[in-house]
Image (tube, helix red, strand yellow):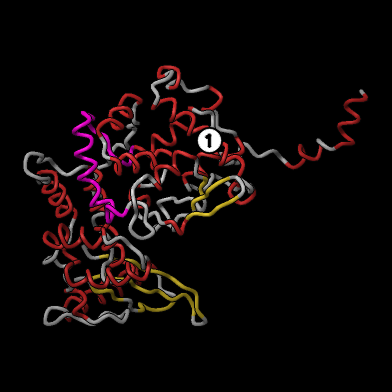
Amino acid sequence: MDLLNIRRTPTTKGLRSILTYWHRGARYRPVLGYNLRPEQERQAALHVIAAIHANTTAQPPADLSGHAGNDACMTFGEFVPAYLQYLKAKRPANDGRNEKIITKHLTPFFGQKLLSSIKLEDGLAYLERRRTDVVGPEGNKHAPAPGTIERECAVLMAILNLAVDMDLLDKNRLKRLPIPEYVKRERVLESLELLKLKETASVNVWRLVMAALQTGLRENKLIQTHEEWLIQRGDGLWLSPSPGKTKIKGVPKILPLNDLAYEALFGGMPRIGGRFFVHWKDANSFKHSWARTCERAGIHDLHFHDLRHTFSTWLTQCGVDYAVIQTLKGEPLPGSAKYYIHNWDNRLRDAVVRLEAFTRSLIAGKNLEKASEVPFSATQVPPSYVERSLSMRKVVPRDRIELSTPAFSGLCSAN
């Protein structure tokens, strides 16, 4: 669909009328004239549009924004290298997930289509195809998860939006694509499941499980844990992990280690090099060991990332404040609290000591029913940690604020 838009800007010659017109993926910005009436603008625009159409029947024109005319015929696959170059500049340490999505899913479907020809119908066809796909190993075939399709659509939107920003598209026609939304997991490791894992897991898998439950770090970060990250202080060992690759995934700057975390990291087996979990290269190589462990333990639908949920839940059950939990997870506090609250060391150390006692009681099978009860005070979030948005209806007028002065309060108390 062609896009017609007239913009008026004041100049020394008067009010200038500029037409912005898209045709076959190319943008045109001719000046219609100065001090034109609405009917004169429309008449001039119709003449210009007719001339554009007449001149584009033989060959694609040059884009007035500086792009060559063949950019209007650029396919999705031809534009992908430009997006990957932009992604590399934006995220130098990206994990390669976007490249894999483009190579495996997006390019086979959209690769031969012109950027200007990708319509909403094409996006709907892609969603239908992905929902009917079957993935997974033999014996465990299943449809792609909604979160997987949502991630693929996010990459697709990023590519098309970049094409718009580079003036290769007039607009992103997949903007209203009904992208599936996944339901966030709320799975937490139960106390009986913890005992089953202890009985069936290998020594190294159990070490990784305990390290996750005592530090709250993600799977890949735990596997990368190196002895150079350790810092000895007066109150014990602290762990300073490497920063996360993206801003979305929070990683604490420094984290206290309790005795359980220390035992999980060092273990009783010899290590090669400085890594504590050298048996696995990354999270992808560990997932098979985790699947076999859960199968032997008879535990269903438990992801390793659920241990991070368990870490936060157990801290809440121990009565740890919301702000301390957020800091241990490496996530910023809401509002301006993250800029003004410092010196967390004592509270962080106290939290992991409580967590250790709580975990040991679960492993020993003591007070399993009482341990699952959440104290009411632990679920309360202090108002100072929550950012509250103010509307104009809640703002107190200035004259009423001035009445609340010490002098005025003294008069009120005297009366």
| Closest to the observer, 338 or 283 | 283
Percent x, y of residue 63: 26, 79
| Closest to the observer, 113 or 305 | 305
Percent x, y of residue 397: 71, 40
For residue 43, which quarter of the picture? bottom left
For residue 408, above or below residue 127: above
Percent x, y of residue 356: 48, 34
- Residues in magenta, as a range: 278-306
Q: Quadrant of the C terminus?
A: top right
Farthest residue in the right direction? 414
| Residue 388 seen anywhere in this rendered image of the structure | no
For residue 128, above or below residue 227: above
Bin the neighbour count of mark 1 within 10 Å (Cα to Cα): few under 14, some 14-19, many 20 and up: some
* Amino acid marked by disc 1: Val
Q: Which residue is mark 1?
A: 353
**Residue visible at 56% across and 41% down in the picture:** 348
| Closest to the observer, 120 or 207 | 207
**The magenta stretch spans residue 43:** no
For residue 78, above or below residue 141: below
| Closest to the observer, 149 or 307 | 307
Q: Quadrant of the N terminus?
A: bottom left
Percent x, y of residue 367: 43, 18
Disc count in the image?
A: 1
**The magenta stretch spans residue 294:** yes
| Residue 307 seen anywhere in this rendered image of the structure | yes
Secondary structure of residue under mark 1:
helix
**Residue visible at 17% across and 62% down in the picture:** 103
For residue 156, which quarter of the picture? bottom left
